[in-house]
Image: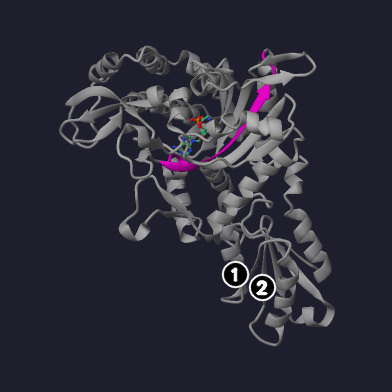
Amino acid sequence: MATNEDSLKNIISHAKEYGFVFPSSDIYDGLSATYDYGQLGAQLKNNIKEYWWKSMVQMHENIVGIDAAIFMHPTVWKASGHVDAFNDPLIDNKDSKKRYRADVLVEEHIAKYEAKIQKEVEKGQKRFGDAFDTEQFLKTNPNVLRNQEKIDEINTKLEAALNDSNLDALRQLIIDLEIACPISGSKNWTEVRQFNLMFSTELGSVAGDAAKIYLRPETAQGIFVNFLNVQKTGRMKIPFGIAQIGKAFRNEIVARQFIFRMREFEQMEMQFFVKPGEELQWYKYWQEARLKWHNALGFGENKYRLHDHLKLAHYANAASDIEFDFPMGFKELEGIHSRTDFDLKQHEEFSGKKLRYFDPEANENYIPYVVETSIGLDRMFLATLCASYQNEKLEDGSERVVLKIPMALAPVKVAILPLVKKDGLPEKAMEIFNQLRPFVQTNYDEKDSIGKRYRRNDAIGTPFAITVDHQTLEDNTITLRHRDSMEQERISIKEAIEKVIQKTDIRSLLSC
Ligand code: GAP
């Protein structure tokens, strides 16, 4: 059986082999935690963006979209708190000279106890089969309870150290747990230091601090600083939202797990401005709306779980993550945060400009409260790949790798395949290709046997294949092959074209 680690590895190599994702600067052996999207990856990414943008902007009369610059005035990041507080606690091993996130070292140590519990559960399942009651076992088995107690104890200390920004306590925890460097195996650690995650660069030719600017670590601030511009020019009435898709940059120290954690990534964020006091009801609304958006893709409701933040950032009065069941376990895919009036208030103070909304109904001015939805496009891409990738055993004993990507998101919607490369079949196939091209992304493929071409299209997630044979020349019928069931139906060219366009239309997701 493939382990979870194997399954992520398979997905990474599949993504490279078929042109979805390449390591960046591949011919120079890549750049860590940086990736390029290939010909199919770029298309899939665009389709995910389209799904998000249309469901946010087109389907909500009170949400508009913007595209703000990556570079922003440096004071923006002072006001937002990123200059002073957007930090990770880092520790170096003196022997290997390797740098680690101190909290992640502790979390990885905790994961070892969790793995022990999992092993006990698997042993129990094997022994008792269907009669095994996992919940009961977790509550009563002495080995499980001992390990859980250890986990709770470490978690309490970790949380306290992080909450108090107590770097000495964090280091002491690493020492007490006897955590060793995975490279050198030694426990020879430096002090823990705070490390700011923002990339900085210099503006123009002027040297010195005044010219230092940052690559934005989140797209949200581009929305906050444009709040009044959009509200006034768009004559927006509260509640209303501003959506944006764009690049963000973070100098992540622990950057790994493929495109899950990158240094350059893309976010799809929406800030929803509401009347103070109404934010928690909108927070609930957006939690439900975003889960519905995910569930419309049909990956299965059990793939998602909502995780409430126990520790809230100082500016939030509620926050949660939508977690997705990635091969490496349930991990954050999207954040939903009730950010109060913190950001607009800070920008008012630092810019000296009023950022208030005049509510004509209440006849009063106020700083709106904000509910944010923030999803990483690259993580959504990875979730889509992971949920779609399947290695199927077929009835004849052979295997096929198929990407069961939701049809509306598939990078190529239909492949046009002449059965043979002669007798006028390529010309007829080209006619169909040209008819479909203006509507959907269509591939024409005449190389290799028809079986190999079907497999190739399964592997890239093409939902339909239209095969043109000699009968097509006589009666204008073709074979329409369905990716998921592999069923084939003989229908007219006209019917096939209509079916492909209708089934792969993004509207099928938007109306869910
Ligand atoms: N404006 C709020 C904000 O940026 P966040 O939880 O730091 O919140 C939001 O990030 C989302 O951005 C995450 O849920 C994740 O999907 C994505 N994200 C964050 N850091 C990332 C990284 N290094 N690589 C890829 N995606 C990332």
Tell me if mark 1 has few (under 14), some (14-19) or many (20+) residues whose alpha carbon lies within 10 angstroms of its own: some
Residue 16 appears left or right of 499: left
Pick the quarter of the image with the C terminus. top right
Viewer-closest of 50 and 436: 50
Residue 293 position within the rendered picture, expressed as x and y whole percent measured from the top left: 68, 37
What amino acid is at disc 1? Arg
Queried on whether the Cβ of the residue with tag 1 lies below 8 angstroms from ligand 1, the answer reads: no
How many numbered tags mark residues here?
2
Indicate the quadrant where residue 458 lies.
Answer: bottom right
Residue 29 appears left or right of 272: left
What amino acid is at disc 2? Leu
Viewer-closest of 237 and 370: 237
Residue 416 position within the rendered picture, expressed as x and y whole percent measured from the top left: 68, 70
Residue that badge 2 annotates: 417
Point 19% across, 25% down: residue: 189
Residue that badge 1 annotates: 453
- Residue 443 lies, with reference to residue 510, above or below; the image says below
Point 33% across, 45% down: residue: 205
Q: Is residue 1 visible?
A: no
Disc 2 secondary structure class: strand
Indicate the quadrant where residue 117 lies.
Answer: top left
Point 26% across, 19% down: residue: 171
Residue 402 position within the rendered picture, expressed as x and y whole percent measured from the top left: 58, 56
* Residue range of the region highlighted in magenta in the rendering: 260-276
